[in-house]
Amino acid sequence: MQVLNYVFNRLSKLAIQQRPALSLAPVGSFFLALVLGFSCATTQADASQSKLKDLRQSGKQSIAEQQLPSIVLAFQPDCRWCMKQGQDLLKLQQACGSELNLSLLGVKAKTSELKRELQHFDPSLTALEASSKFLKQVKGIEATPTLLFFDVEGDLITKRRGYLKPERLFAAASMLIDEYKPNDGVAPCRMSP
């Protein structure tokens, strides 16, 4: 417990030094990030509310069309781990999609290449193209796959670079749902065998 207190205090001091006008994500979100080994991020207001180009239809939409927590998978062409993470995201959508906004986010390629890559992902997943404004708000995507976790207000809680095993993805989703809908009597997200 002393280690957790030390880490939290250290991160709080760093956040205040770097961005005095911003606060750290809520304490529960911090523990979500800490438990799952993510880097803890300061909040990035309204990143999930940015209107992004829809890769499946004409028009624009935001990641968080509903007032729910959001999980976004950043992908790029020819990324085998992105495809695998996309399959896990589909399972998550089938298990608890009504409790979360789940989206794909194309990065680091032309629109035509991103659209072609969508053949590897289920059509039921919303697919958007990252804008430079959005990437700036989330402090960039260094590599793919990257998972972005947003709270119900659209603030970035944390991001996780690299493939996240399904067990940990479902655990993170359950924690995210519990944080914003505690004890509502709904069973937590569970992986189907």
Image (tube, rainbow, N blue to C red):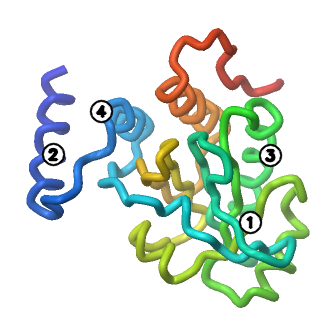
Q: Nearer the viewer, mark 1 or mark 3?
A: 3
- Rounded to the nearest whole Å, what is the CA distance between mark 1 and mark 4? 34 Å
Residue 17 placement: quadrant:
bottom left
- Asked if marks 4 and 3 touch (Cβ < 8 Å), the reply is no
Q: CA distance from mark 4 to mark 2?
A: 11 Å
- Classify residue 1 as left or right of residue 132: left
- Compare residues 171 and 152 and report the one nearer the observer: 152
Which structural element holds mark 1?
helix
Work out which quarter of the rendered image holds the C terminus and state it. top right
Instruction: Please name the residue that numbered disc 1 is placed on.
Output: 80
Asked whether disc 2 touches disc 3, contact meaning CB atoms under 8 Å apart, the reply is no
Three-letter amino acid code at disc 1?
A: Arg
- Relative horizontal placement of residue 144, taking residue 189 as reference (left or right): left
Label located before the other in sequence (4 or 3): 4
Q: What residue does disc 4 label?
A: 27
The mark that comes first in sequence, 1 or 4, is 4
Vertical arrangement, residue 63 with respect to residue 164, above or below:
below
Mark 2 or mark 3: whose residue is earlier in sequence:
2
Where is residue 139 drawn, in percent x and y? 39, 70
Pinpoint residue 78: horizontal percent, then vertical percent.
75, 76
Residue 132, image x, y percentages:
51, 83
Within 10 Å of disc 4 (Cα), the crowding (few <14, some 14-19, many 20+) is few
Looking at the image, which residue is at 9% across and 49% down?
13
Secondary structure beneath disc 3?
A: helix
Which residue type carries mark 4?
Answer: Val
**Where 182 falls versus 63 (above or below)?**
above
Which label sits on residue 12? Answer: 2
Comparing 37 with 90, the one in front is: 90
